[in-house]
Image (cartoon, rainbow, N blue to C red):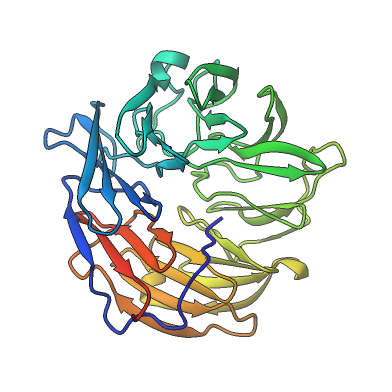
Amino acid sequence: MGRVDFLPERLPAKLTPQWRLGLTARGLGGVAATDRYVIVSDRDLADTMDVYHCLAADSGTILWTVRQPAAGNLDYGNTSRATPVIAEDRVYLFGAFGHLLCVELPTGKVLWQTALAVEFGPPQGRLPWGLCGTPLLVEGKLIVAPGSATASLAALDAATGAVLWKCPGGPPSYGSFIVATLGGVRQIVGHDADSLGGWDLATGRRRWQLVPRRQNDYNVPTPLVWNGHLIVSTENNGTRMFGFTQDGIIVAEPVAQTMDLAPETHSPVIVGDLLFGVHNELVCLDLKDGLRTRWRGDDAGFADHTTLVASTERLLIATMEGELLLIATDPASYRLLSRGLALPDEKDAYSHPAFVGTQVYWRGNEALYAFSLSER
């Protein structure tokens, strides 16, 4: 999670956009990209439709646009919270009101679509942020979290949209799921509104449930896996490392835990045996040493939500104020390598950028921008 193949030794002296596409609505969902295509979510002027644009990666030219009626009113606006999922010649688009579309990537043709609330029933509870989790594509299955009483979690055939299985349970969380082999068992792992869980990939049966000691987490950060352990970070329960039995069931008592890293909406990343995450400061935790805090780094950009990606040697942090910070993955101390203001006219930049080689595609509230991280 949060890993990229390339980060430069230093950021370019000036982060000048190669192209810019103006957008209509405030954006929260991440950008998806390949070396040919960039996918970004938007809304129409009347704010009654989800709008998705596919752009040429080299020029920013709009290649196609898909519109899906999706009326409603959510906190922080109504655009999609999920990141589009690109798989070969298809892209899966998921809106905050539960509309899911499978689109042919080169043409924009809608191959199939469904509305989770119609297919599975409305989500339980009040969801002021809407449905936020990015669908998980694994072994031909698209895993989604309708959060209804009969389908807390469900799997669709990625090719056709047909329902393969559904599992009853609780309301949805605001986070995304992963697939991992834990305790020798390959399983889906993530949160519902009130608990952490593991589900059987083939049948959807819930294998285990763990209710945290402190309630009312938003459960936004994505879980991580390290050396057969599950790493979970939330705002009320901090960061915890869990082990598993030989039959793939979580051991309720954490192997290690700390409140030094307790992010509300930010997902940490792992580099080697170190965990990096932002919680008012940039925090480096030692996974081999019981989540011991190795160092903290202070910067004004860490005071609010950030997105963080890592290569083997460096971290790149994108701040709400449109700034990029390049930091060494040094276990000994915090070392800021360089920084640059990429979005000078943007505020509250929640969207996760997409990285393809040296290219970065970052969505602000007003526009989508393309940058190169290379000086050339």
- Look at 57% across and 62% down and name the residue there: 269
Q: Position of residue 357 (x, y in %)?
A: 44, 65
Would residue 278 be visible to someone looking at this image? no
- Look at 26% across and 81% down and name the residue there: 14
Q: Is residue 184 left or right of residue 374?
A: right
Q: Nearer the viewer, residue 156 or 199?
A: 156
The quadrant holding residue 189 is top right
Q: Is residue 144 left or right of residue 14?
A: right
- Look at 20% across and 55% down and name the residue there: 367
Q: Nearer the viewer, residue 306 or 339?
A: 339
> Can you say which quadrant of the picture contains the C terminus?
bottom left
> Can you say which quadrant of the picture contains the N terminus?
bottom right
Residue placed farthest to the right in the image? Answer: 246
The quadrant holding residue 312 is bottom right
The quadrant holding residue 321 is bottom left
Q: Is residue 320 left or right of residue 272?
A: left
- Look at 55% across and 69% down and name the residue there: 311
Q: Position of residue 273 (x, y in %)?
A: 70, 69
On screen, residue 92 above or below 55: above
Report the number of numbered marks.
0
On screen, residue 74 above or below 344: above
Would residue 301 be visible to someone looking at this image? yes
Q: Position of residue 270 (x, y in %)?
A: 62, 63
Q: Nearer the viewer, residue 62 or 325?
A: 62
On screen, residue 125 above or below 345: above
